[in-house]
Image: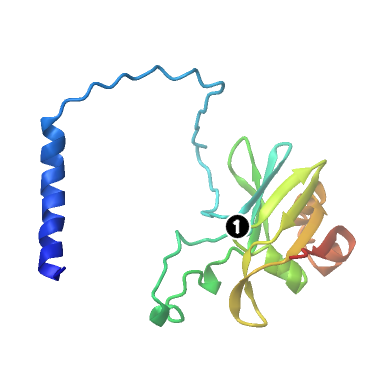
Amino acid sequence: MKIQDLKQLLWLIVLGLPLACATQSTQVSVEKPAAVPYQLQLKQLAGSDFPGLHSMIYARNNDKLLLMAGRVNGLHGFPGQSRASANPSFPADKKNETAFVIDVSTGKVLASASVTTLPSPIAQQLTASNTQFTVVNDVLYVAGGYGYDTDSKSMKTLSQVMAVSLPEFISAVEHGSLNSDFAKQSIYVGKIAI
């Protein structure tokens, strides 16, 4: 089949299908959906100075919210292979390097601290995007993520898991003690077997 024939066929499909559908009448019966067992309400925080982050870690402890890791830019692009090094999808300078403690009731940032003061493997994970995380019995568990590897100077999927007391981490951010000593005493790091 020639390209011209394919173009004509495509035009027939594009123009003919809507006309064919318009000449047929169909009755559709719609059932009323079952009641949803929950409600969702969004409320904007007045005067909020939340940082603009996405793909981050968020964990709540009582009236405080911890935000860290993720990205500070908008959605990433997908440049062609020839432009990837000049315009990477995940620029290294757009990773979030700050842990924020936020008052849940007001949206105000109570404290912030750089996570780059922590040992490199921990800082690498706490600046990564799309980590998996959960809090169980006040312990924050963080696994994996997609982060910038300073050794290879490239992005990679991380094979690390860490655990830390959420109240202790929040306190360290609030008191300016997020450092190597805190990491040695309070952050437990392991590898994920793949």
Name which quarter of the figure residue 11 lies in.
Answer: bottom left
Indicate the amino acid at tag 1. Answer: Asn
Residue 61's spot in the image, x, y percent?
Answer: 74, 41
Seen from the viewer's position, the closer of residues 103 and 28 is 28
| Residue found 42% across the figure and 76% down from its top | 87
> For the view shown, which residue lies furthest in the front direction?
1
User: Is 127 positioned to the left or the right of 53 in the image?
Assistant: right
Quadrant housing the N terminus: bottom left
Where does the image place residue 48, in percent across and percent down from the top left? 53, 43
Q: Coloured how?
A: rainbow
Question: Where, by quadrant of the figure, is residue 19 drawn?
Answer: top left
For residue 27, side relative to residue 55 (left or right): left
Lateral position of residue 2 relative to residue 132, left or right = left
Q: Is residue 163 above or below residue 95?
A: above
Check the image and report above or below for 64 versus 7.
above
The residue at 78%/71% (across/down) is 119
Q: Residue at x 58, y 78 (%)?
A: 154
On screen, 165 above or below 87? Answer: above
Q: Is residue 166 visible?
A: no
User: How many numbered dots are placed on residues in this image?
Assistant: 1
- The quadrant of the rendering that contains the C terminus is bottom right
Q: Residue at x 85, y 60 (%)?
A: 188
Looking at this view, is 99 or 84 the one in front? 84
The secondary structure type at the circle numbered 1 is: loop
Q: Position of residue 67 (x, y in %)?
A: 64, 51
Q: Which residue is mark 1?
A: 130
Q: Position of residue 25 (x, y in %)?
A: 16, 25
Badge 1 crowding class, 10 Å Cα cut-off, few under 14, some 14 to 19, many 20 or more, is some
Examine the rendering and report whether any part of residue 102 can be seen. yes
